Image: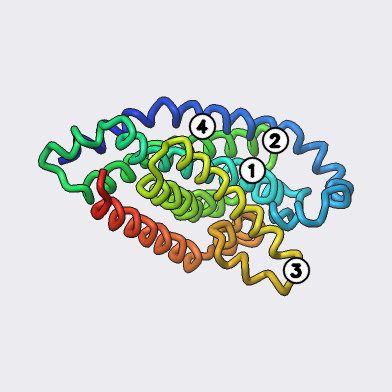
Amino acid sequence: MTAILRNESGKLVRGSLILTGLLVLLSAMFFVVFPSIQEEAELFEDVYPEYLLLILGIEELHTIEGFVGGYVFPFIWILLGGIYFAYVSAGMISRDIRTRRMDLTLANPVSRESVVLQKVAALWVPLVALNLGMLVILVAGVVALGESIDPLALAMVHLLGIPYLLVCAGIGIVLSVVLDRVETAQATALVLVFVLWLVDGLSLMNPDFEWVGAFTPSRYYDPSAILVHEEYAILDAGLLFVAFLALLGVAILHFVRRDI
């Protein structure tokens, strides 16, 4: 039975297109300012507070790889993309429970496990939209600036970024089955992803607390390392995917046992 998957996928099309369009426009604005940043890269790095450089992973800002990896992806993919996936996922179950639509869904011959899995599987829509939109604007921006970028590194920064977004979605789906109010679940998911991103960067400033960052998903996805150094952390991506499966398992287990 894939009716839930088809229905949820259709619901996500409009929001995914709007999000992708906004992020593409924001990325285009970043590319517009790249020539000025390239000329004054050292000045920009001196002006930025140390904690912000650590959070964004900025290095070699004068190169297109350093700019995309340390300027575009931290804002567009890690922060805004992560928040969106957590926010959308946090409303998937809680909204249906709140509106009593879940009662109608479960009146059909479908298991609770299948409901959660199909709703999460519908996230393929924003995943595809974001990947295609970002890929197009990045290639167009690089070409328009007369620069060049390694296509393999560009493909890998997208591919290895998917598990990060899935973990954010996993955080949202757990909150969606635990919390009753849609607004509370979505607000908590949004804040939690932002705080985790912030903690990751701030923990790097103090060696005594650097271990704290190991519990944040953004620690395992470094666009600058991929684009600037061509370091493909497959193991880190694998750990993120395992974390996503663990969060999904927790969500399913709780949803199966809860009284709605």
Does residue 4 lie above or below 223 as drawn?
Answer: above
Nearer to us: label 4 or label 3 = 3
**Marking on residue 30:** 2
Nearer to us: label 2 or label 3 = 3
* Sequence-first disc among 1 and 2: 2
Which SS class for mark 4?
helix
Does the CB distance between marks 1 and 3 fall below 8 Å? Answer: no
Nearer to us: label 1 or label 2 = 1
Comparing 206 with 189, the one in front is: 189
Crowd tier of the residue under label 3, counting other residues whose Cα lies within 10 Å: few below 14, some 14–19, many 20 or above: few
Mark 2: which amino acid? Phe
Does residue 95 lie above or below 210 as drawn?
Answer: above
Crowd tier of the residue under label 1, counting other residues whose Cα lies within 10 Å: few below 14, some 14–19, many 20 or above: some
* Sequence-first disc among 1 and 4: 4
Q: Quadrant of the N terminus?
A: top left
The residue pinned by badge 1 equals 75
Query: What residue appears at the point 17 percent right and 47 percent down from the top-left corner?
Result: 111
Does the CB distance between marks 1 and 2 fall below 8 Å? Answer: yes
Crowd tier of the residue under label 2, counting other residues whose Cα lies within 10 Å: few below 14, some 14–19, many 20 or above: some
The residue pinned by badge 4 equals 20
